[in-house]
Image (cartoon, rainbow, N blue to C red):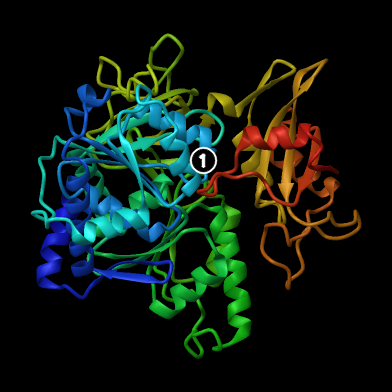
Amino acid sequence: MTFTRTIIELAASDPGRLALAGDGDRLSYRDLHDACTRIRSGIEQLLQYRPASSSDDETGGVPIIAVSLSRAIDAGRFIAGVASFRAIVAVLDPLWPLEHRLETIRRVDPALVITDDSDFERALAGLEPEAWHGSAIGLERFDALAAVAPVSAGPEVRPRDEPYLLLFTSGTTDLPKGFLRTRGSWDYNVEVSRGPLFASAGVQTIAPGPVSYSLTLYALVEALATGGSLHLQSRFDAASAVRTIARHRIERFVGVPSMLLALAAAARREDEGGTASGTASGTAPLASLRWVVTGGANQSEAIRDRFREVAPRALVRSYYGASEIGFIGTSDAGDGTHLTPFAGLEAEVRDETGARVPDGDIGTLHIRVASQVERYLTATSGDRITGDDGWSSVGDLAALVDGEIVLAGRAGDMAVTGGHKVSLPQVERALATVPGCEQCCAIALPDAALGSIVAVVIEGGAAADAGEPGAAPDDSPIGGAGAPVPPKAVMQAELRRLLPEQFVPRRYFRADALPRTAGGKIRRVAVAELVAAGGAERL
């Protein structure tokens, strides 16, 4: 595995170089190498007599080690440690509902679960032996055992075709589907990261948010694989992130687009506060940023423009990918939906029958690339990811136009109103250009006459009066709950200018906060539930 080799080499040649930081801790490459050795020692001690697992056939007998840890720095060291010998690491989001996590354990049947959640540990202990063949241990007890266990051989570079990582689809509302990544499949992705995504030796990156979120997890792997340094945050805190960027002269940021608005607002407050928090005198807090990489959602032009005001040297690049397939394309401008495919990738758009559609027509996007996964773990889903023809799809809708991939969302992102198909992401992208509406979500509401109607929910403060301008005052936060939502008439007028009439929302709502995943993605289904429950103010 590429990053294990890098850890071994840098522990010898540059042992003091920072590998991981976060939650008040710092690990050099030498520290991380030693942590990998201790983790391997402890796991091998615990797995001496492990029983057979129901997942052994699909993993080739490689044991699955599941970790559910609240601190990002702990999750980071365990990913590195478990991947450094013959084992598969599975990262369970500690914010998943308890029953989601328990059912995932029942299905995946890992040999060992390591957690710092005492409730989860007790619930695991209560599972019937026939439901799960493994064992659980608390983090403190594991670290104590690993410290005195017979010392293992330490980290080693394993074969490229060996599985090392079990990833999951979102487990927020539905049971997550799991799929295995081989070491070689991620080696391929690391080479992509070295170029278009700006990961390289010595570069300091900050990637806020839980490591269970794939965007953060990928940032960890690519930073360690390329010899970079990664700063983590267990929970995104914009003010703390800005201070970390300023103090350590961080050059690269990886996160979801919604984080940029919060960073911009925090940077302005930090700039006004002077040097008390550690910002160099006369230097803007985000002046060191050279590359800003966003994923997980479309990067609107409005957010790009707002962020460039506080980080003028930074190139803001959004990328699109699917965890089951790999990196697909990038965008440096516009609404983030027109993508330049990564080198070595083939793309096709097909209709319901599987036939290719003409350029410009919307259909289901299919990809052929070296990093794609064949199927989900059988116990979590019977769905295939890659067909017999070698092409993969996760159901994204798109069109091919002049060699670009133009995203149109997923099947669940389409609404049918009065016989018209409406792309909800397209509505959101248009609304996000209106100041004060950068954080918004379009939903379909049932309607007796039309089948459904389009509605939008904007995250922000109390709506401005009809006579006020739509833009937020200069001293208000950029986006989010602190900025006032513009008047409904302002939003309607702008959307009628930007969208076909059938796309213009019939109803407008305001919410203090939109439901999000732990990684920051807006949850469309949860937003619709919020409106149905009366939790949003109708404008």
**Residue 100 placed where, x, y %?**
50, 33
* Image quadrant in which the C terminus is located: top right
Residue 291, placed above or below residue 174: below
Q: Is residue 204 visible?
A: yes
Relative to 197, is 225 on the left or the right? left
Quadrant of residue 220 within the rendered picture: bottom left
| Foreground residue among 325 and 102 | 102
Using residue 59 as the reference point, say whether residue 119 is left or right of it: right
**Residue 191 placement, left or right of 128:** left
Residue 225 vertical position relative to residue 98 in the rendered view, above or below: below
Report the residue marked by disc 1.
Answer: 96
Q: Disc 1 on helix, strand or loop?
A: loop
Looking at this view, name the residue that lies furthest to the top: 353
Residue 27: x and y in percent read 28, 69
- Judge by depth and name the residue closer to the eye, 281 or 406: 281
The image position of residue 373, as x and y in percent, is 28, 29
**Residue 15 placement: quadrant:** bottom left
Pick the front one: 349 or 441: 441
**Residue visible at 22% across and 29% down?**
51
